[in-house]
Image (cartoon, grey):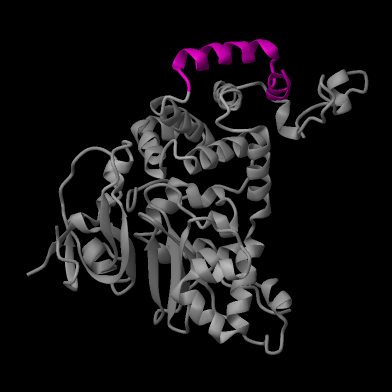
Amino acid sequence: MGGQQTDAELPEDHDFALWEKRVDALMVLCSTKGYFTVDGLRRAIEDMGEEAFETMSYYERWVAAVNQNMIEADAYTLAELGERMEQIKARGPTYGEATDG
Amino acid sequence: MPHDHHDDDFHHHGMSPSGHPYRADDDHPLTYWQTMEIAMRELLTEKAILTPAEIAAQIDAMDSREPANGAAVVARAWMDPEFKSRLLANASDASREMGFDIGPMHLIALENTADTHNVIVCTLCSCYPRNLLGLPPDWYKSRSYRSRVVKEPRKVLAEFGLSLPKGTTLRIHDSTADMRYIVLPARPKGTDGWSAEDLATLVTRDSMIGVGVPKSPS
Amino acid sequence: MADTNVETVRIKSMMPPGHIRTPAYLRGKCGVIERNLGEFANPERAAYGLKKDMQTLVRVRFLMKDIWGDAAENPEDTLDAEIYAHWLEKVS
């Protein structure tokens, strides 16, 4: 990253959405409890490659990386995750409705 | 707000079906990654790895960390030479001494002087003194800042409105590993006799990252 | 392991794949040790959940001209980075 040519524009600030704060909290709590290290998180983000940097937001990359590390730590299985995500989608079309269950 | 509000629409009374108020960011279409966040949180709670109270407390702690914490540390260092010595020797301990919960963070304070100006960056990811200043601004996490500030820092600082004299040595600090950094900016002139509270109002977030300087007393 | 008592060091220019906290733009460059930070877990193992391997971590200070050569914006400005000892080699 350091020294590479990129576009010059610096982005504006934005307030963090609730789901982003929750991702941040999951990262802090799960790493504090020893499920992974900050290096494990960074490694998972790097392994997503350049394309992820272009197509995913900051906390989208983070939630993917926290999940990758929790799968590797055997906290839950991919099948459990996938089935739960299907149930959540069925609850409603917005984040608020899907969260409220 | 991009959304229309109709009084006859249940959702737009501001309450969810379970009777909780909607947040402004709750009524956008659910994304794949948001779905993953909800699923992870539910699974981790059910497996007793986390509790909802822990998650709520962590978000509260995050929300309470803001640049004002760092500003209080800077103002104290301006007023109290012995505290400043302790801050420069071990910024983690000095911050804890002021009651800030900075966790296991290893913090180094970098002092700006008449002939030295310091700037912090993390070229590899987005390391930031978040336990003291809160979450990093978007530009700090951007590729543009991370790639350019190590190669053309004076040009980047000029875009922030900061022009350094030629004689000033600029020191860039890349947070590559286990340390986090905070810049101790120089105390503005014309603030003799000011209280710590008043001094702290001059200390901006950007001045503690090094892309700005404190406000001038008005 | 490299001797961290020497003042001037060169960052190894090797390019293995994987999670590495030595920035590519500093590899092969020379700087001086600004301070010793103590022992920290080697991220190249921690990233993969392997057993902790403590490594000496130092801050190395580079002159901009030693990183970017003639392209340096202001040659005498500096850049400091934290580098693990196994990435350092002695400059003779």
Q: Main secondary structure of the magenta part?
A: helix
Q: Is residue A42 left or right of residue B131?
A: left
B74 w.r.t. A83: above or below? below
Quadrant showing the N terminus of chain B: top right
Q: How many numbered badges does the structure rendering display?
A: 0
Q: Can residue C84 be spotted in the picture? A: yes
Based on the displayed image, in which of its 4 quarters is residue B33 positioned? top right
Q: Residue at x 76, y 33 (%)?
A: B23
B18 w.r.t. A39: above or below? above
A11 in magenta: no
Q: Point out the stretch of residues depicted in magenta.
A: A76-101
Q: Can residue C73 be spotted in the picture? A: no
B164 w.r.t. A75: above or below? below
Q: Is residue C43 left or right of residue C88?
A: right
Q: Position of residue B143 (x, y in %)?
A: 43, 46
Q: Position of residue C76 (x, y in %)?
A: 30, 75
> Which of the two residues, B152 or B124, is positioned nearer the viewer here?
B124
Q: Residue at x 73, y 22 (%)?
A: A100
Q: Position of residue C11 (x, y in %)?
A: 19, 58
A80 in magenta: yes
> Which of the two residues, C39 or C43, is positioned nearer the viewer here?
C39
Quadrant showing the C terminus of chain B: bottom right
Q: Residue at x 62, y 86 (%)?
A: B189
Based on the displayed image, in which of its 4 quarters is residue B207 positioned? bottom right
